[in-house]
Image (tube, helix red, strand yellow):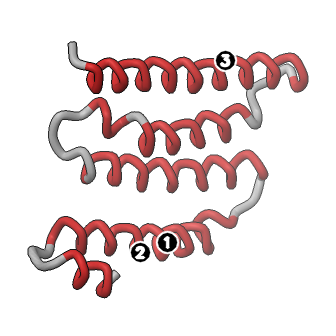
Amino acid sequence: MNDNKKKVVSYKAVMMGLYGSALIVCMVVNLAVSHNLSWFWIVSASVLVAFAITVLPTLLKRHRIFLPAVVTTAAVYLLLFVCSQVTGGNWFFSFGISVATYTMAAIWLILAVVRGFRFNWAYKIGVI
């Protein structure tokens, strides 16, 4: 195994360990303090967002940009929905979706320009 492949394998192992540790610690603390899982669901949804951005591209052989972007978009909506449910608010459907869609549309536009157009990088940066 070459040096670069070893670094990727180490990176995956460290990140998976950190995400798993964060989930276990937060679950134990939430159960110890509240005797139920309340805010743990917010932590788990946010770990899913972080995982989709940092680790998922290293696990894929193809579509390293598109699939993580799809999963990240879905995870952001899930995170907002979970936050809305845990806090007892009804703001997700009223304005949470529109704010998240506006933000994610900007990210998808950048991805479309970078991957979709076949012209010079200077032009791509100008369009972005």
Q: Residues within 10 Å of mark 1 (few under 14, many from 20)?
A: few
For image coordinates 24% across by 69% down, the residue present is 114
User: In the image, residue 7 lies at what x, y percent?
Assistant: 36, 23
Which quadrant holds the N terminus?
A: top left
Residue occupying the far front of the picture: 3
Instruction: Tell me the element at label 3.
Output: helix
Task: From the viewer's perspective, tell me whether residue 86 is left or right of residue 93.
Answer: right
User: In the image, residue 65 lies at what x, y percent?
Assistant: 27, 51
For image coordinates 42% across by 50% down, the residue present is 72
Amino acid type indicated by mark 1: Thr
Q: Please tell me whether residue 126 is drawn above or below residue 37 in the rendered image.
A: below
Instruction: Tell me the element at label 2.
Output: helix
Quadrant of residue 52 within the rendered picture: top left
Instruction: Tell me the element at label 1.
Output: helix
Amino acid type indicated by mark 2: Ala
Q: Please tell me whether residue 88 is drawn above or below residue 96 in the rendered image.
A: above
Quadrant of residue 32 within the rendered picture: top right
Give the tally of numbered discs: 3
User: In the image, residue 126 lies at what x, y percent?
Assistant: 31, 86
Q: Nearer the viewer, residue 128 or 75?
A: 128
Q: Which residue matches tag 1?
A: 103
Q: Residues within 10 Å of mark 3 (few under 14, many from 20)?
A: some
Amino acid type indicated by mark 3: Ile
Task: From the viewer's perspective, tell me whether residue 3 is left or right of residue 79.
Answer: left
Q: Disc 3 to disc 2, how far (Cα)?
A: 34 Å
For image coordinates 49% across by 71% down, the residue present is 103
Q: Disc 3 to disc 1, how far (Cα)?
A: 31 Å
Q: Which residue matches tag 2?
A: 106
Which quadrant holds the C terminus?
A: bottom left
Q: Which residue matches tag 3?
A: 24
Q: Disc 2 to disc 1, how far (Cα)?
A: 5 Å
